[in-house]
């Protein structure tokens, strides 16, 4: 496992693996000590102190991707309320979003959401993301929704920008809380830790906005995000997106005959993983006490993370 310590993120579902010596990373063993060591607050605080609060995380032990990766494992669906959309064409788009999410086709969903945004239908896409997020949908939604809100704020009239950025910050904080609290459900403890670092990178602008808020306003956003986490907790299921992308998944991808491994020159390789590998989940009886511990400390962890970003 010592060679699987540095992974460069790629949008097209590939990842580049470098040996430990080249990456200059010394934290691979630390990542594998277990869920308690991998908890978001500790990892984010340590990173912020070591890098002076920089947001870009370069050493990621993960199979990470900017918009998710397509069709992981067998699709599982559950009933969810349909959006009330008057126009048949709009309903068809919403139905397509639902189908892609329910079948875990994250890359295709990310592309579909981006097309709607580029076509001037961002309000429809954001409304759907908000509904499915509040319905306890995959943490993947928080990654794309927070980013979309920040992008929309940049193009909106001045009077709407603060509201959209505040909403983006709430979604990013909520998603970090979900990754932390649901992380113990994963059999591979390094996977949720890697996702937390990926979110910290991709939602850097939203976290930075929250960190710069006055303390009372920031605390209100955190409380609203944690209230949302409590509301969605009974609805959330085991999430492949959270539990893939760790050390175990990378090792399996490298061994999977369906994966394509290509030399990058020097001592690195680019891996296009096979799509048949499903996430592995921990025993619920073992996970529940760790989730309860994470929920008790999450608010303090989030406050410390944002405080550290201000220094």
Image (tube, grey):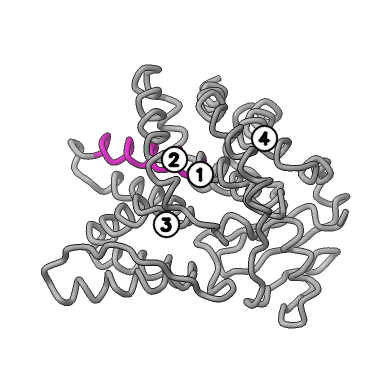
Question: Which sits in the foreground, 27 or 81?
Answer: 81
Mark 2 and mark 1 residues within 8 Å of each other at the beta carbon: yes
The earlier-in-sequence mark between 3 and 4 is 4
Residue 224, position as x, y percentages in the image? 35, 32
- Give the dominant element type of the magenta stretch: helix, strand or loop: helix
Distance of label 2 from label 1 (alpha carbons): 6 Å
The earlier-in-sequence mark between 2 and 4 is 4
Region in magenta: 161-176
Could you say whether the residue bearing mark 2 is in a helix, strand or loop?
helix
Mark 2: few, some, or many residues within 10 Å (few <14, many ≥20)? many
Q: Which mark is residue 178?
A: 1
Residue where numbered disc 3 is placed = 137
Residue where numbered disc 4 is placed = 43
The residue sitting at 50% across, 61% down in the picture is: 67
Residue where numbered disc 2 is placed = 174
The residue sitting at 64% across, 38% down in the picture is: 290
Q: How many numbered marks are there?
A: 4
């Amino acid at each position: 496992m010592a060679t699987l310590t540095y992974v460069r993120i790629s949008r097209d579902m590939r990842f580049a693996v470098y040996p430990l010596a080249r990456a200059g990373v010394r934290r691979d063993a630390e990542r594998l000590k277990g869920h308690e060591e991998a908890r978001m607050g500790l990892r984010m605080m340590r990173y912020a102190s070591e890098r002076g609060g920089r947001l870009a995380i370069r050493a990621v032990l993960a199979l990470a991707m900017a918009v998710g990766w397509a069709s992981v494992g067998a699709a599982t669906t559950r009933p969810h309320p349909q959006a009330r959309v008057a126009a048949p064409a709009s309903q068809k788009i919403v139905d397509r979003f639902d189908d892609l999410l329910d079948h875990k086709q994250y890359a295709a969903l990310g592309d579909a959401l981006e097309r709607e945004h580029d076509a001037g239908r961002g309000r429809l896409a954001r409304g759907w993301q908000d509904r499915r997020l509040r319905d306890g949908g995959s943490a993947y939604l928080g990654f794309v929704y927070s980013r979309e809100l920040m992008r929309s704020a940049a193009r909106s009239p001045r009077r709407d920008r603060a509201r959209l950025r505040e909403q983006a910050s709430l979604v990013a904080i909520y998603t970090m809380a979900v990754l932390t609290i649901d992380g113990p459900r994963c059999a591979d403890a390094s996977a949720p830790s890697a996702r937390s670092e990926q979110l910290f990178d991709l939602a850097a602008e939203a976290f930075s906005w929250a960190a710069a808020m006055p303390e009372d306003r920031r605390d209100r956003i955190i409380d609203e995000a944690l209230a949302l986490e409590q509301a969605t907790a009974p609805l959330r299921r085991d999430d492949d997106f959270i539990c893939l992308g760790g050390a175990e998944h990378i090792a399996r991808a490298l061994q999977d005959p369906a994966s394509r491994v290509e030399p990058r020159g020097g001592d690195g390789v680019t891996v296009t993983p096979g799509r048949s590998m499903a996430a592995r989940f921990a025993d619920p009886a073992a996970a529940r006490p760790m989730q309860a511990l994470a929920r008790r400390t999450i608010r303090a962890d989030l406050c410390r993370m944002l405080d550290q970003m201000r220094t």
